[in-house]
Amino acid sequence: MAETVNSNVLSWMESNIDKTSKDEIIKMLQENETELLDSFYKKLEFGTGGMRGKMGIGSNRINKYTIGLATQGFSNYLKVNYKNFKEIKIVIAYDSRNNSKEYARIAAEVLSANDIFVFLFDDMRPTPELSFSIRSLNAQGGIVITASHNPKEYNGYKVYWDDGAQIVAPHDKNIIEEVNKLSLNDINFDFKEEKISIIGEDIDSIYLAELKNISFRDSIEEEDIKILYTPIHGTGIKLLPSAMKIFGFKNFEVFEAQATPDGNFPTVKSPNPENKETLEMVIAEAKKKNSDLILATDPDADRVGVGINKGNGEFYLLNGNQTGSILTYFILNVLKQKNKLFKDDYIVKTIVTTDLISQIAAKFDVKCENVLTGFKYIAQLIREKVGEKFLGGFEESYGYLFSDFVRDKDAIMSSIVIAEAYAWAKNQGKSLWDILMDIYIEYGYYKEKLVNIQKEGQKGQEEIQTIMQNLRDDAPALINDTNVIIISDYLTGIESNLFNGTQNKINLPSSNVLQFTLEDGSKITIRPSGTEPKIKYYFSVNEKLPSKEKYDEVDKILEQRLKNLSEAIISFE
């Protein structure tokens, strides 16, 4: 590690980076060895959600130069792939984070310096609008500056291809190879202003017009559902209020305390709608107003959290699996009632998303495809399934999509569909809580749990790799006194059935993921995070739910089972 750090520090100090940056490196050398090591022990690479890291100087940080290197490498790769194009065009968007606007401008300048034409948004915009605009503007790709739901110290850089989807293999690895060929002095910052065109409300209007086509209602009528919405200081404020108005949700209110875009996210510890503490303020306000529904989008508005009024003034926060299951149930029911379900229809979920979605799809005779973690793989499948109809894509991490005019998870679109699902339930005299209970009674109560274990720095990365290797070398045959019947190793692409001794090929790209299926139907999935210094443990258990009245009793049984499983598998470290 010391050699890598020294090499990276030396290359930065000998380059033509600005004096302020060099002074920061000198200060770390003199005063903060820990920060120096973490800033230079590696180079940022593309993970499941692009390039993401803390802001600051260094090869392992998001800054002017790592943004510049990534963009220069992307430029070089574009010129190879589109060498016969008269003009290559790229769209750039950014979120509300600190420095996002500046980083977006830097990316635009580097592209323009390389004679690539840039459409640059005039202000922050949701990530799904970037995805949409690539195809709308007939561009060859896009960049969005965002770190999604990470804490305020982070920023990031996502790259998109000409279909509006995030890059996958081989483009991701090839771009990194191009970046790795470069030194800091190879970045061309001599921008050409005439190659940069500012876009904004014109694209908003086209996106919103297209969004109207996704409605699952026969006609868009006014709905008197009391919706309280928080953009958590992010970009959702740019589009969702307008979208809700178009769809007739007249009683839609923005939570003012979190309405103003702010990269410091002053009212929350982390702007992640998955975290209950992030939504404490909006829940309190919803209780005062007796709202029906809470919607909370993350800073780049590609993911949405949902809170539902159980009918007694108490709010229940749906997790991503529950929201995905409700939405699957809703859209398939509505389409079946309209005789609009066909043999080539399909939905997609990731391998760590609840199997309840698969069960619902099977009941409606709709194909449910499984892909690796990361919405880019859902988009890749959409691209490959020409002639088949995409109905929905689901990630347990609060990401959903219901039409392929966008090729990434879309919290604006998803919020509309969630509101329509609420209206559908209300027309039956039910709440979304009632719908969730109906699903559990019909298909079984599936309960999931995610455990994230933070492993910072180079040492943390080594520990994560050791954990994964130990689980491969000495895979448990018994977990919590229950037999393991299937081990799926997505790195080797082999699924081993311990019950009958057979092996099958997994027809997905290689990925550092292990999955254990137990005899009682429980499932455990382990993988290193692609965007944060964490190892992730996903747990899923299920049990029959005889009636709504038995919910609390069955919930306690499943909660204990999840606790036992998590304690058992994590002890294998």
Image (spheres, rainbow, N blue to C red):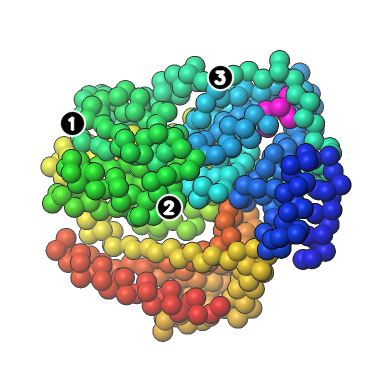
Q: What's the amino acid at mark 2?
A: Lys
Mark 2 secondary-structure assignment = loop
Which residue is tagged 3?
Answer: 199
Mark 2 closeness class: few <14, some 14–19, many ≥20 residues within 10 Å? few
| Residue 402 position in % (x across, y down) | 41, 37
Which residue is tagged 2?
Answer: 269
Q: Residue 404 lies in magenta, yes or no?
A: no
Looking at the image, residue 433 sits to the left or right of residue 504; the answer is: left
Mark 1 closeness class: few <14, some 14–19, many ≥20 residues within 10 Å? few
Q: Residue at x 61, y 50 (%)?
A: 53
Q: Residue at x 33, y 39 (%)?
A: 257
Q: Which numbered disc, 2 or 1, marks the residue that appears first in the sequence? A: 1
Is any atom of residue 358 visible in this view?
Answer: no
Quarter where residue 65 is shown: top right
Is any atom of residue 498 visible in this view?
Answer: yes
Q: Is residue 571 placed above or below 99 in the rendered structure?
A: below
The segment highlighted magenta reads 107-112
Q: What's the amino acid at mark 3?
A: Ile
Q: Residue at x 22, y 30 (%)?
A: 251
Quarter where residue 211 is shown: top left
Q: Which numbered disc, 2 or 3, marks the residue that appears first in the sequence? A: 3
Measure how far apart labels 2 and 3 are at the Cα level. 33 Å
Q: What's the amino acid at mark 1?
A: Asp
Measure how far apart labels 3 and 1 are at the Cα level. 34 Å
Looking at the image, residue 71 sits to the left or right of residue 160; the answer is: right
Q: Is residue 251 placed above or below 86 in the rendered structure?
A: below
